[in-house]
Amino acid sequence: MFKEENFNLIKKEFNIETNKKTIEKLNLWHNLFIEYNSHTNLMSAGDVKVLFEKHVFDSLAILKWDEFNPNKKQKILDVGTGGGFPSIILALFFPELEIVANDSRIKKINFIIDIKDKLDIENLKISYARVEDLEPLNCDIVISRAVGTIKNILRLSKKHIKEGGHFVIYKSKTLKEELDEIKEANAKIVSYNLPLKENFERHLAIIKQ
């Protein structure tokens, strides 16, 4: 289960209150994640120990982008969602968002299906396919975390972003080199630190289409 201090940090960093229903679902999700990961590898044992600090907190970091309004009806495609970061976390916190969790790995998708069913996450849709094989989804935001390079993910998923929409990718050390590679000088960068003992700087690169 998550601690009260975790939710206090969410309030401090992202200016959002976590209601009782969301806390209950997050704690159930936490238990299900730990159980599933014990027999089907979603992440390393080391990362499980910092599940909140390194993955839940990081998933919510899109709130540090001042143009992002989580209470507005928007369609968001999460490319390569893996264990559900940020798709499940955003869907649990913000019911107004329509989240499409995409992955081409069946063991990841099976977990997402199980979580959607057990937690009754109505605003979460599931896409088992390579993102480039999908028909255009006309999304307000395409988001990706810990999947691949900016160049490759943007190339494969660009068709799913509506005109005026945004591509948002989570990055750490390789951000500058990857932006230089695609010659994207107008990307907005939002930087933040994960609440870990060691210094762990992260960035959001936001590219308007």
Image (cartoon, helix red, strand yellow):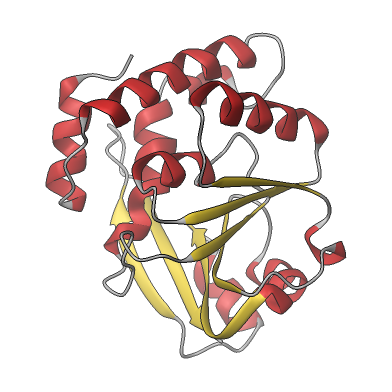
Q: Which residue occupies the foreground of this view, 80 or 46?
A: 80
Q: Is residue 56 above or below residue 150?
A: above
Question: What percent of the width, then of the height, locates residue 76?
Answer: 54, 62
Q: Tell me residue 202's x, y (percent).
A: 39, 55
Q: With respect to residue 97, does 8 lie above or below?
A: above
Q: Quadrant of residue 104?
A: top right
In the displayed structure image, the side of residue 16 where residue 165 appears, left or right: right
- Classify residue 169 as left or right of residue 5: right
Residue shown at 21% from the left, 36% from the top = 18
61 is higher (above) or lower (below) than 2: below
Residue 36 position within the rendered picture, expressed as x and y whole percent measured from the top left: 63, 14
Quadrant where the image shows the N terminus: top left
- Return the residue found at the far right: 133
167 vs 73, nearest the viewer: 73
Task: Locate residue 115, reporting x and y percent.
Answer: 58, 26
Write the residue at 51% across / 29% down: 120
Residue occupying the point 30% across, 59% down: 63
Q: Give the side of residue 6 with respect to residue 149, left or right.
A: left
- Which residue is drawn at the image coordinates 52% and 41% (left, top)? 122
The quadrant of the picture occupied by the C terminus is bottom right
Q: How many marks?
A: 0
